[in-house]
Image: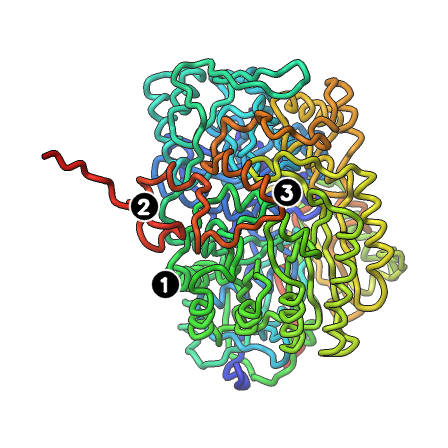
Amino acid sequence: MNFPPIMRIRVTFNKTEAMRYTGHLDVQRAWERALRRANLPLSYSQGFKPHPKINLAAPLPLGYTSIGEMIDIWLDEHFTLETLKSRISAALPPGLKITALSEGEIYGPKLPSLVEGAIYTITLIENIRDLKARVDTFLSKDSIIRERRKKNYDLRPLVHSLSIPIDNANQEQRLSVELSAKPGATGRPDEVLYALGLDPYDAKIERTTLLLKDE
Amino acid sequence: MLTPTEIQTKLNRILPKVQKPGRYTGGELNQVVKDWDAVDTRVALAFPDIYDLGMSNLGMAVLYDILNQRNDVFAERVYSPWTDMENAMRANDLPLYSLESKHALTDFDIIGLSLPYESLFSNALNLLDLGRIPLFSSERGNEHPLIIAGGHATYNPEPMHAFIDAFIIGEGEEVILDVVDCFQNAKKQNHNRQATLRALSQIWGVYVPSLYQAQYNEDGTFAAIQKLADDAPLPVQKRLVPKLPPPLTHFIVPYIDTVHNRAPIEIMRGCTRGCRFCHAGMVNRPVRERPVEDVLEAIDNAIQSTGYEEIGLLSLSSSDYTHALELIEKVNQRFGEKNLSVSLPSLRIESVSVDLMDSLKNNRRGGFTLAPEAASERMRKIINKPVSNQQLLTTAREIFSRGWTTIKLYFMIGHPSETLEDVQAIVDLCKEVLQVGRETIGKRAQINAGVSTFIPKPHTPFQWVPCDSIEQIIAKQTLLKKELRGRGLKLNWNNPQETQFESWLSRGDRRMAEVVYQAWVNGAKFDAWSEHFNFDAWIAAFEKTGLSPEFYTHRQRPIDEVFPWEHISTSVTKKFLTQDYLWSLEGRTRIDCRTQCYACGILPTFKDLRRENPGDIWQCPEVKAKRVKVIK
């Protein structure tokens, strides 16, 4: 643990049903524990109380699932990506699943600073007859002022796109929304639902992609 | 009753709207799920407080593991929902369910209820009610699960006798399997509920309260217990595990934060010091230690199966573990470079403890905890915890000089015969320790005094003595609050009403069950949570039943009083407890019983077990081999 890290990896993963209600810090802890079970030498920060060097891209609101989460992990030893993928996969708890794994530059930019946006798929539990009209009205506006944590803000510029996908095999109604995710300019899908006059508790929300700046 | 699928559907709608929904989902790493229809016996292990607390209970985790190792048994977990979830469940007609398979409580064969402390009694009733199980044992039929309770509070089971079908008295690891076998056997023979309970009563360590009846004297004191079945045991002997098996390491790892979010490993059971206020020290005899190798291997396995970053090495008195230094050295050798934090609670006031803590890295952040329990020499002799102030100050100096800035000192007020001078001694001692800290590290030195109030417990040498009244407690706390403030001093204390409440439940008799029931009707629940504790609900319950709280809490019992818990035997004899109590009045102490046996009663009761488990498996003297009569 006294050496600088030897390897940095970037993992793309799913956060599924079993961990829907696990918050950001607890997801981080779940990764830390999985790596310890996998007996991989996680790097630690120096100092009085060393912290494991792992870094999640962006918090996912409680209750959402995701098929596009990302985490950076620093290790004190070098392994092949195949070895890492199989050892970590075997140690992950139900609710986390690796979809891709790559090696990154040890001192490259931090993952959270690269996140620019996120795409969500929203599945509505009950059918809304005038959904298309509501979406059109939303998109026609230049500004949608909403209040969150006692502060007013404009939701509209945070919504890069909003659509009703047509490739839907099920009968369920769905929405696809791309939102800004930058410091001080992060849009929340539940806010979009409120603005559409819908109750987020009547919807299942999944993050499908995190959009990163080019490194 | 709802099916698991129906329950899951309702949950999907409810969970997004409650606080910390992760408490109610299950599905964690290492949870066990079996085919419901492929097992013979389904057991719900229920802890009557929230998930965050219940998941940290080692006893529950051990029983879960033991039961699930059997192919014919499926054990699942159940916890109390927090009040917001309870409201949502009641509003949506959702019964209490198991986390693993989402079956309603009524679908189970056996509910194993954990009762480690008395303040869970009202929650236990609420849990049964949420599970739609009749609260009174007498109202349950063959179609209902058996309600079996165990845990430290059940050494006096009587306040809960009306609600529980059978109690486990003592250690659960072995008896739980006997209970399952007996239950399966009874089922095969088509026994009804009564016959099943009768069969269970024959197991060592099982108490079936409906097979007994209590009698009282005219003055309201307890007279005697009477058997209602010829073969019901009297007394009911506690169960113990003669040799501790290797510790549990395959823990369920929660997805959300819990109270003790770590792997607990019990290194030793019992304590040889014999502090007279200490219930755990009396009921957990004899002292049994786990070998160092077992503990090291357990840490290894626990890391592999859980990935926990913290290991808690548990016992009632860590520095009394014979190989404590060796253990810590080896822990460091093996795990020192792994960013693993190892905690070693319950250390004695001596420099060895500081050496132990010093060798454990990453541990300086929490402060160093010492528990002198009393501050005057006189008082310490009465409670049989003879530590000199000099020893405490030397230890404190050592702690500060090795880098700790905070010392937590635990005391109790309300010990027998305590005066305001003894309380003043707590103030003086805290200030002396702070002074030592200032001399050693300057103004950073911090003393946190935790002063709780003594509650006389059954089966201890202080079972005869009154608990302080609210007025006495307030007078003592006022003194402490006035004196223990300013820079470097912090005081924590208990609500005197909560002390009264625990006191009447601890030494309650069968009539107390009516009070527990009425209190629950009046809305009592989560009594262990200060923000929910409802003193008025309990006082109203006493009024309704015509019983007096003072009778249970403030009465000095005559030395020859018969206690309502005497038919439950911890094997520490009443003769020993009586003598120990009388000695306390003279200020006579009994030092560590590792060095000298004081004949508490354990050895004569369990001499055969001791003979089968020789040497340092127990920290009691050896029992000589059976004398063989030589016939000429």
Closer-to-camera residue (A53/B454): B454
- Residue A67 seen anywhere in this rendered image of the structure: yes
Horizontal side of residue B64 vs B105, given as left or right: left
Query: Could you tell me which residue is drawn at 40 percent across and 56 percent down?
Result: B290
Q: How far apart are marks 2 and 3 (CA)?
A: 32 Å
Sequence-wise, the earlier of marks 1 and 3 is 1
Image quadrant in which you'd find residue B130? top right
Q: The numbered mark 2 sits on a residue in which chain? A: B
Give the x, y percent position of residue B303. Answer: 46, 63
* Residue shown at 65% from the left, 48% from the top: A204
Q: In this view, does B150 lie above or below B590?
A: above
Q: Which residue is identified by label 2? A: B623
In the displayed structure, would residue B548 be above or below residue A109? above
Q: Is residue A201 at least partly visible in the picture?
A: no
Q: Nearer the viewer, mark 2 or mark 3?
A: 3
Q: What is the x, y in percent for residue B483?
A: 85, 58
Residue B220, image x and y in percent?
A: 67, 18
> Residue type at mark 3?
Leu
Secondary structure beneath label 3: helix
Q: How far apart are marks 1 and 3 (CA)?
A: 43 Å
Q: Name the residue under label 1.
A: B293
Label 3: few (<14), some (14–19) or many (≥20) C-alpha neighbours in 10 Å: some
User: What residue is pinned by disc 3?
Assistant: B585
Comparing marks 2 and 1, which lies closer to the viewer? Answer: 2
Q: How many labels does the image show?
A: 3
Q: Quadrant of residue B372?
A: bottom right
